[in-house]
Amino acid sequence: MPESRYDALMQEALTGRLNRRDILKRTAGLGLGAPAIAALLAACGGTSTTPTNATTSSTTTTSTGASTTTTGGASPVAGASPVAAATTATSGGKRGGGGQLKLLWWQAPTILNGHLSQGTKDFDASRVVLEPLGDFDKDGALQPILAAEVPSLSNGGVASDGKSVTWKLKQGVKWSDGQPFTSADVKFTFDYISNKDTSATTAGNYAVIDTIDTPDDNTVKINFKNPTPGWFGVFCGAYGYILPQHILQSFVGTNARNAPFNLKPVGTGAYKVDSFTPGDNVQYSINDNFRDASKPFFDTVNLKGGGDATSAARAAIQTGDVDYSWNLQVEANVLQSLSSGGVGQLIVYPGINVERILVNLTDPNKDVNGEKSQKDTPHPFQADLKVRQAYNLAVQRDVMATTLYGQAGTPTANVLVAPTAMNSKNTSWKYDLAAAGQLLDQAGWAKGSDGTRAKGGVKMNVVFQTSVNSLRQKEQEIVKASFQQLGINMEIKSVQASVYFSSDAGNPDTSNHFYTDLEMYTNGPTTPYPLDYMVSWWGDPSNVCQKSNNWAGNNVERWQNSDYDALYKQAQTELDPAKQADLFIKMNDLVITNVVEIPEVARNGVSGAAKTLQNLNLSPWTSELWNLVNWTRSK
């Protein structure tokens, strides 16, 4: 079904112009999937009948004869609705009895407070314990977690003017220490995040909130500064974890990073932390105060961190040493070899993230009051658009996608590839070293006797950093070979992931410090209304990574563009779906045409799992562990 027709139906459902019978009649024979129909029914106040733990899967055979499970069928973002609600059914069984679940995250977590984190591995390790009000399933549909139901226009939760949303909370929920969870904890979480001295990495997502009302213990009303179409961008998904007021009320502001909670959080999730060694291992056990007496299935969870992606793939797929391994950014031929005859399986599911090269627009070699890459110090040559355009022509995306990623990725010209309606068709990419050389010549960067381009006594020497990963190091080598042909001397730098993605304000090698000329990693949206992602290029000083905010901003390149800022501001309040898509496409196109980043590969989700694991319901929109409470093992 064309997305435009789906969107039109969704708008009619949200505004009360369609009832359940209308939805069923209008979608008959259109080939619309069950999750999308459930989303429409939920939007108009109907009942979703789609089991939240169901995972559609098919098996494809690789050239080696290996078995690969592809979950989710078609793209999870086509026709996905962020307002769909479904009730998670209980298993009807008893709690525990499943033994230990062994997880392997080859990028090791360093902190267990997601609001102070700068890496997916920390958000994931936190998600085992901490919970949001709602989270997103594989179809982008919002599911209630700590909320009793998902707000909508039809149930009165979402205000018709878009300026407020009211959440009803589940009653009887307790923190793992036995204290009651109430609306006061939600308000406290906002106060904690919005205090600028806390330096919360999620602060930009919550800047849309004006005030929060708590009329009773089980009701939260969020008042926005302006009409907010992405009302589910706060307290939902990977950036939505609710914090306990009674534990952290003395650790707001400058004292936030001193809280013991950061290493041993108290949460409402199905598990609690027994022990945590940053950069190594987290051991969890069942939270006896968890609200569902029939869950979770596993008695303990061990999340081991460190190593490399290839070893993680081998441990889950080939040897079965672990039950699940995350983010297998491993060469395609290696994954095929490991899968052949392995005891586990390779799981590939549609993704929304992009592997990209970030271009530093500031000078990483000039020190300004103890700060390099200071936002007001232009890069000596990368501040020139022609130079960046030359860079863009020197990246072999097709070689990376074909030889390194295989079924795990495709070349892309966009930084925003999902939802589908917001994936720009205005952009393109090509590999053309001759054209790149001409651009550098026009900019006055001529090759010297040593083959390196220079201008005004400044040589084009660049440092290109990323995390330690054999696939990423090969990506670096591919880029380096092309740059060297152009006359750009490149030094490759590889940083341990535990450092590169850490929130350590004192370590110059973190990705947010960006003290090199180029760097590379993967990123993407965490909600179907991707303001939380496009904030990455918002130029407000509070959002720019710098010493004054402990490098906790989202704008890592320190890019300033008034046109982009105006589009971002408009997207915060635009309620028309067609105009929304246009705004996000224009934002993407500005990032691309200005070559602030060079997108390389749109990545699918790739994980390894024991064949006995069930009910994973992996989602590209949030943590892979969002549904851990429902994971089980077959006999």
Image (cartoon, grey):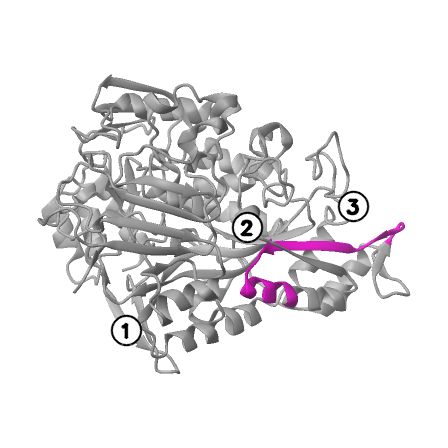
The x, y position of residue 524, in whole percent, is 46, 50
Answer whether residue 471 is magenta in the image: yes
| Label 1 Cα neighbours within 10 Å, binned few <14 / some 14-19 / many ≥20 | few
Please give the label number shown on residue 59: 1
Residue toward you, 580 or 461? 461
* Image quadrant containing the C terminus: bottom left
* Image quadrant containing the N terminus: bottom left
Q: Quadrant of residue 484?
A: bottom right
Indicate the secondary structure of the residue bearing disc 2.
helix
Marked residue nearer the N-terminal end (3 or 2): 3
- Residue 40 visible in this rendered orientation of the protein: yes
The x, y position of residue 462, in whole percent, is 74, 54
Mark 3 or mark 2, whichever is nearer to me: 3
Q: Quadrant of residue 274?
A: top left
Marked residue nearer the N-terminal end (3 or 1): 1
Amino acid identity at mark 3: Pro
Please give the label number shown on residue 380: 3
Marked residue nearer the N-terminal end (1 or 2): 1
Judging by the rendered image, the residue that carries numbered circle 2 is: 589
Specify the segment rendered in magenta. Answer: 455-477
Indicate the secondary structure of the residue bearing disc 3.
loop
